[in-house]
Image (tube, rainbow, N blue to C red):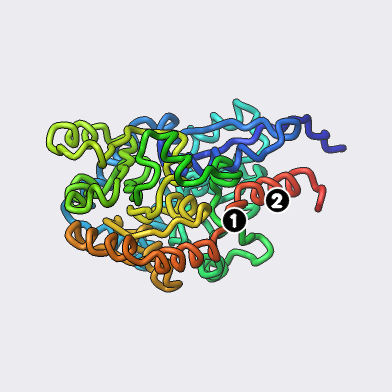
Amino acid sequence: MQTAKPVYPLKVALIYGANPSGHYSAAKAVAEFLPPCIVEPVFVDLSEVYPDFGPFVAKTYLQLLSKTPAVWDYVYDNNFVALAASALRESILPFSSQKLADLLIKRNIHAAISTQAFSSLLITKNKRLDSLPLFSVLTDFCAHAYWPPKGVSAYFAPEKSAEALLRKKGIAPEKIFLTGIPVRKEFTGPQPGKAAARKALGLAPKLFTVLITGGSRGLGDLFSAAQALKPLLGRIQAVVLCGSNRRLARQAEKELDAKKFLHFVDFTDTPALYYAAADLVVGKPGGITLAETMALAKPFLIYSPLPGQEERNTTFLRRHKLAETAASPEQLAPLIKKYLNAPQALALASRRLAGHSRPHAARNIAAKIIELLTGNGG
């Protein structure tokens, strides 16, 4: 019996947890480099496939963070908890994965690209999807306990220590590719100079500019961070990316009176121009935020990391001396003032980040996936 030849373009699902999120940004970045003559990208939002489960997990996660963050840090990558979770995976996930399997089969999906551990687990635990090529893309500088060791065609790792952790989990070295974390095309092409970017955004072209970001959801105590910078305003200007946190922008309009040098920006799907305008980026060390910051070689200050993956990203940054930490809003102004008064320190921080940058990760991931799907090596 002859195997039917694939019909191009192949339908490839890009599966992520929710939109907006870093997982979605990573999926979108990879999709931008998939040639349309070979691949038809099909975006799959797990929060839509499992509309009750997604909000429950998000609500539980945020409640744990606000009330008992140490519990989440313990659960996140604890060997005993991971062992208990593995038993749960064997009993619950095969049943839970049926809905996703139904969707992928109905839409005639040829392969899947997962930017989140949970979607990778769902696919690997469903027998109907055994023959589905699965490509898993890590979006943090660590490989936590929940990435599946079996059933994945290829893993794309951000850096060497994450690659080593995947190997320790039993994943064959030939299935792991060291690519970096994917960022969108807007971060990889020619960028405007700082003055031009600031002018385009309505900012003072020559003023030292601090970009404060809480990721796609605008998490972290960004309001207190902005308040802490008020004594420096005029010598600097600050832009706060609020993500989907609409309350933050409304709160700032009511309570802060330094509008000339302090700008709160509602959700934007094209943040590269804001990064290009910045001298310094302050924020939660989410994997996508860090990859975007590195792509443009912008010095970074760690502020308000979430327990779990962001604390492990912080460990990565500290290990390589890539960022300093502001443990509280009160520590922000002195650190920013330090860089304001020492251009050489700012330049050194920029060079260090550039040395760890992998701005073409999305292109390289897409190229390897095409090679593996078509059998055409480079």
> Which residue is at the front of the view, 191 or 108?
191
Q: Is residue 312 visible?
A: no
Task: Residue lying at the far front in this picture: please name it.
Answer: 206
| Residue occupying image coordinates x 49% and y 53% | 291
Query: Dividing the image into 4 quarters, which one contains the N terminus?
Result: top right
Q: Is residue 59 visible?
A: yes
Query: Label 1 sits on what residue type?
Result: Phe
Label 2: few (<14), some or many (≥20) within 10 Å? Answer: some
| Residue occupying image coordinates x 13% and y 32% | 254
Residue 161 appears at what percent x and percent y? Answer: 51, 70
Task: Assign a secondary structure to mark 2.
Answer: helix
| Residue occupying image coordinates x 56% and y 68% | 160
Task: Assign a secondary structure to mark 1.
Answer: strand
* CA distance for labels 2 and 1: 10 Å
| Marks 2 and 1, the one that precedes in the sequence | 1
Q: Mark 2 points at which residue?
A: 368
The mark tally for this picture is: 2
Task: Residue lying at the far left in this picture: please name it.
Answer: 255
Q: Tag on residue 156?
A: 1
Q: Tag on residue 299?
A: none
Task: Indicate left or right for 164 with 22 as reference.
Answer: right
Task: Indicate left or right for 165 with 13 as reference.
Answer: left
Residue 306 appears at what percent x and percent y? Answer: 29, 55
Residue 302, picture quadrant: bottom left
Query: Label 2 sits on what residue type?
Result: Lys
Quick check: marks 2 and 1 in contact, CB under 8 Å? Answer: yes
